[in-house]
Image (cartoon, rainbow, N blue to C red):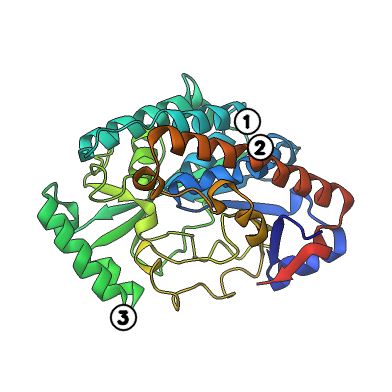
């Protein structure tokens, strides 16, 4: 029977897997991609990794980096009880998103802000900031020029120009957006070297953590831009620049453990419709990517991973039922991954990037 998981490993990561399997203390970085409702298909994988595998003793910090829903997943992992945080987040995301027929950006921001509050719970902010070994990095996109505007026409114009320029080169996005990474790593962040796009680093604090997470998931034109306490500017979804995090995640000896929705990586939000714009292996020599197999996805309710189109194609009740069904089905992925890690057979399943 075909495995419900697809596992890909970079050249250095493959050597490690073949030598000693997947060991917690080999891992330095856990990334989380943008993707909205797609995080539900990773529920079983996240529950196993966040609640069991990644909770063992470590000899050095573990750096968690995410954009959009990926940053929300990392915020779950860095709480005292990650599985409970995931459960609150999943429940809020499935059942808490009820909208009027044509919701305003304010309505969407308000409702998803409430989902985020459920995910954080009453003590989540303090737990994330005080975690002894996990260092959280939240990617946002700071609007520049018209991309910082509250006016819909100005923002739409900026996005259209950015999308056209992106066809030529991703570097053109720097005219419209600047990457800003809010983090708890102090002066030892392994991402300080990022220079593929203009990048700024800011500390996460009690005053700005929630706002940074909300900004990281605030899709332009769908939600309101976010003003983050302590810094100037308007901030948007980190996935605009870093959709699946095709970036240099550090040159240290440790591995990057990447639970992902897909077995491929799309660099930026504007690249989703560009089939030729897929990440190569260059940034992923140290990476072990774990994703649901395409056969598993075809077996899901609706035959696909949940996405934003479900709000338009399904009734409220139909969407909730389908998304819950996907979350329930994802439990099998966590069980298979647990067996592969415990048995050491994960190297047998791994394919090259």
Say which residue label 2 marks.
47
Left or right: residue 348 compared with residue 316? right
Alpha-carbon span between mark 1 and mark 3: 42 Å
Alpha-carbon span between mark 2 and mark 1: 6 Å
Are circles 2 and 1 on residues that touch, CB within 8 Å? yes
- First of labels 2, 3 by sequence position: 2
Q: Secondary structure at mark 2?
A: helix
Badge 1: residue crowd in 10 Å (few <14, some 14–19, many ≥20): many
- First of labels 1, 3 by sequence position: 1
Which numbered marker is on residue 168?
A: 3
Badge 3: residue crowd in 10 Å (few <14, some 14–19, many ≥20): few
- First of labels 2, 1 by sequence position: 2
Q: Position of residue 319 (x, y in %)?
A: 45, 38
Q: Secondary structure at mark 3?
A: loop
Specify the quadrant of the image occupied by residue 347: bottom right
Q: Which quadrant is home to the N terminus? A: bottom right
Residue at 54% in and 42% down? 40
Which numbered marker is on residue 83?
A: 1
Residue at 44% in and 75% down? 277
Q: Position of residue 101 (x, y in %)?
A: 24, 37
Could you tell me how many numbered marks the image carries? 3
Badge 2: residue crowd in 10 Å (few <14, some 14–19, many ≥20): many
Left or right: residue 2 compared with residue 304? right
Report the front residue among 102 and 187. 102
Q: Position of residue 264 (x, y in %)?
A: 56, 66
Residue at 50% in and 31% down? 89
* Residue 345 visible in the snapshot: yes
Q: Position of residue 223 (x, y in %)?
A: 26, 43
Left or right: residue 27 compared with residue 224? right
Q: Which quadrant is home to the C terminus? A: bottom right
């Amino acid at each position: 029977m075909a495995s419900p998981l697809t596992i890909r490993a970079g050249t250095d990561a493959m050597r490690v897997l073949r030598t000693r399997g997947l060991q917690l203390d080999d891992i330095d970085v856990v990334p989380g991609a943008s993707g909205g409702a797609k995080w539900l298909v990773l529920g079983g994988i996240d529950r196993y990794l966040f609640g069991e595998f990644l909770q063992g003793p470590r000899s050095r910090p573990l750096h968690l980096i995410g954009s959009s829903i990926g940053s929300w997943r990392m915020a779950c992992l860095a709480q005292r009880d990650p599985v409970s945080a995931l459960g609150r987040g999943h429940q809020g995301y499935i059942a808490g998103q009820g909208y009027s027929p044509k919701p305003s950006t304010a309505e969407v921001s308000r409702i998803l802000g409430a989902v985020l509050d459920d995910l954080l719970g009453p003590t989540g902010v303090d737990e994330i900031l005080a975690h002894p070994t996990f260092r959280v990095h939240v990617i946002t996109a700071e609007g520049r020029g018209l991309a910082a505007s509250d006016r819909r026409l100005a923002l739409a114009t900026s996005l259209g120009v950015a999308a056209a320029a992106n066809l030529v080169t991703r570097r053109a996005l720097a005219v419209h957006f600047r990457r800003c990474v809010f983090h708890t790593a102090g002066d030892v962040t392994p991402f300080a070297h990022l220079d593929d796009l203009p990048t700024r680093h800011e500390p996460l604090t009690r005053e700005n953590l929630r706002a940074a997470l909300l900004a990281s998931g605030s899709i332009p034109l769908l939600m309101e831009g976010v003003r983050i306490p302590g810094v100037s500017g308007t901030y948007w979804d980190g996935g605009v620049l870093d959709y699946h995090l095709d970036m240099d995640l550090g040159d240290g000896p440790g591995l990057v453990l990447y639970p992902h929705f897909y077995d491929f990586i799309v660099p930026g939000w504007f690249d989703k419709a560009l089939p030729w714009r897929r990440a190569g292996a260059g940034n992923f020599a140290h990476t072990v990517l774990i994703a649901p197999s395409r056969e598993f996805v075809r077996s899901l309710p609706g035959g696909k991973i949940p996405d934003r189109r479900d709000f338009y194609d399904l009734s409220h009740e139909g969407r909730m039922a389908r998304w819950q069904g996907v979350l329930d089905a994802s439990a099998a992925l966590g069980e298979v991954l647990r067996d592969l890690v415990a048995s050491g057979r994960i190297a047998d399943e791994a394919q090259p990037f």
